[in-house]
Amino acid sequence: MAKDLGLALLIDTYGACLTDKQRSVLEMYYFEDMSLGEIAELEGISRQGVRDSIKRGEYTLKELEDNLQFAQKFENLNMYTRAIRKSAKDILAYVDTRGYTEQIRRAANDIVECADSLDKYVQDEEE
């Protein structure tokens, strides 16, 4: 069974929506990198039972993400935050060495565009 490591973010985002058993099995499988056999031994169930629990949990997580898209929204916010941080650091570097230059103007415009994107993103979520 190949691991979809993108599911780790979904477990963090929606783990509370799973049964205790599903969450526990998924955390052992994805976060602790345990094999089906190791999990089966710890949980006192068959390897097939572990596999079924993982598949049901994965299905639930993917359905939640398809409907709610919280994990994707979180990733988008992180992307915007990284862009804002980079632009702000660029401004600081240019201010320290050159004063007001075209690079500063571009970096400042990048910050404004990122802030506008964040504002639009938040407004879309409120509607």
Image: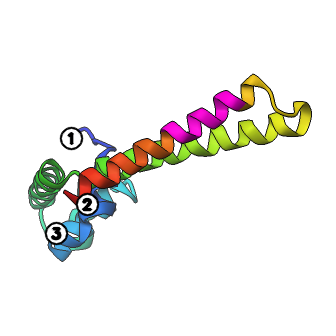
Q: Amino acid at mark 1?
A: Met
Q: Are marks 1 and 2 in contact (CB under 8 Å)?
A: no
User: What's drawn in magenta, residue-wise?
Assistant: 105-113
- Report the number of numbered marks: 3
Residue 14, quarter of picture: bottom left
Asked whether, in this view, residue 14 is left or right of residue 55, the answer is right
Q: Which residue is mark 3?
A: 18
Q: Residue furthest bottom?
A: 20
Name the element at disc 2: helix
* Residue 20: numbered disc: none
User: x%, y% of residue 102?
Assistant: 74, 23
Of pointers 2 and 3, the one earlier in the residue sequence: 3
Give above or below for 34 relative to 16.
above
- Mark 2 Cα-neighbour bin, 10 Å: few <14, some 14–19, many ≥20: many
Give neighbour class at mark 1: few <14, some 14-19, many 20+ (Cα, 10 Å).
few
- SS assignment at label 3: loop
Magenta stretch encompasses residue 111: yes
Q: Nearer the viewer, residue 29 or 6?
A: 6
Residue at screen point 28% across, 42% down? 3
Using the image, determine if residue 125 lies above or below residue 45. Answer: above
Give how far apart the Cα atoms at labels 2 and 3 are: 10 Å
Quadrant position of the C terminus in the picture: bottom left
Q: Nearer the viewer, mark 1 or mark 2?
A: 2
**Residue 26: which numbered mark, if any?**
2
- Label 1 vs label 3: CA separation? 21 Å
Residue drawn where x is 13% and y is 68% of the image: 45
Q: Work out which quarter of the rendered image holds the N terminus and state it.
A: top left
